[in-house]
Amino acid sequence: MFSRKLTKKEVDLIYKIKEFIEQKHSESEGHDYSHVLEVARYSIEIAERIPEKIDPFVLIVGALFHDIGRIDAPSGQLHGLIGGGITEEFLQTTWVDDDTVQKICRIVVRHTETSMLPPETTAEKIVFDADALDRLGLMGMLRGIMGKAGSIKDIIENRMEKRKKDFARLHFKESKELGRALYKETLLLIKLMSNSLEKRINNIDKLKLPK
């Protein structure tokens, strides 16, 4: 649950950040503006369902900034750490106090396992879960494939293995309730893709030339 209501000052800044994020993510592929908004939406839904009290400003701003480190980056391996730095630099130009800035930056850094720093606070775990939820289902699978280099076999097998683990890594039972239908859809898609991939592999080197 949220610990309080947002102030007008906070709402105004959130909309300013939203415009900034929309502009920066406008040309992204798998991590576009729609993904950012979905993560923010899931974050709010999870926070409203759990008993722990969450600061709405910290959570929403953290969710909006969570993938800013992917913009113009050669890979996503350091995007949490890079994003934390960008977020801090942006927020230091605003009225937000240092303690709040650091809480938000921690969300950005710790929302991804690539930072090697697991989420610790409730807000950090919520955004981690929200990001994972948007990797499930048809849209999540498509997002995971977009822009990836390699053979169809390697890309699909890599994505399938990662998606199988996402649901199990969710921190809150409320997150699992939100994602259960998407997870079932994911398993069905994995089965379909596995069958299609197996058929494709079996057909390799079986080209019949016309007589």
Image (cartoon, helix red, strand yellow):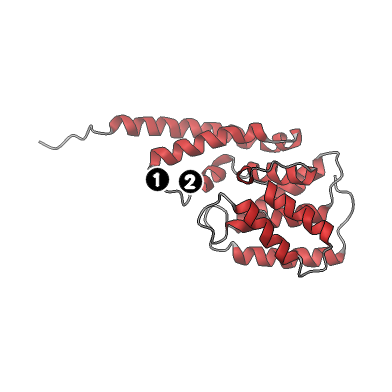
Q: Quadrant of residue 15?
A: bottom right
For disc 2, the neighbor class at 10 Å (few under 14, some 14 to 19, many from 20) is some
Name the residue rendered at 76%, 49% in the picture: 44
Pick out the residue farthest to the left. 211
Give x and y (percent) for residue 152: 39, 41
Residue on which disc 2 sits: 145
Compared across the picture, whether 210 is left or right of 58 comes to left
Q: Mark 2 belongs to which amino acid? A: Ile
Name the residue rendered at 83%, 68% in the picture: 95
Give x and y (percent) for residue 143: 53, 48
Would you place residue 99 above or below residue 19 in this image? above
Q: Which mark is drawn over residue 150? A: 1
Instruction: Give the quadrant of the C terminus.
Output: top left
Compared across the picture, whether 182 is left or right of 46 comes to left
Q: Nearer the viewer, residue 147 or 209?
A: 147
Name the residue rendered at 71%, 46% in the picture: 127
Q: Mark 1 belongs to which amino acid? A: Gly
Name the residue rendered at 78%, 66% in the picture: 13
Pick out the residue farthest to the bottom. 93
Give x and y (percent) for residue 115: 63, 46
Q: Nearer the viewer, residue 7 or 87?
A: 87
Camera-near label (1 vs 2) is 1
Compared across the picture, whether 182 is left or right of 151 comes to right
Would you place residue 172 above or below residue 17 in this image? above
Question: Which comes sooner in the sequence, label 1 or label 2?
Answer: 2
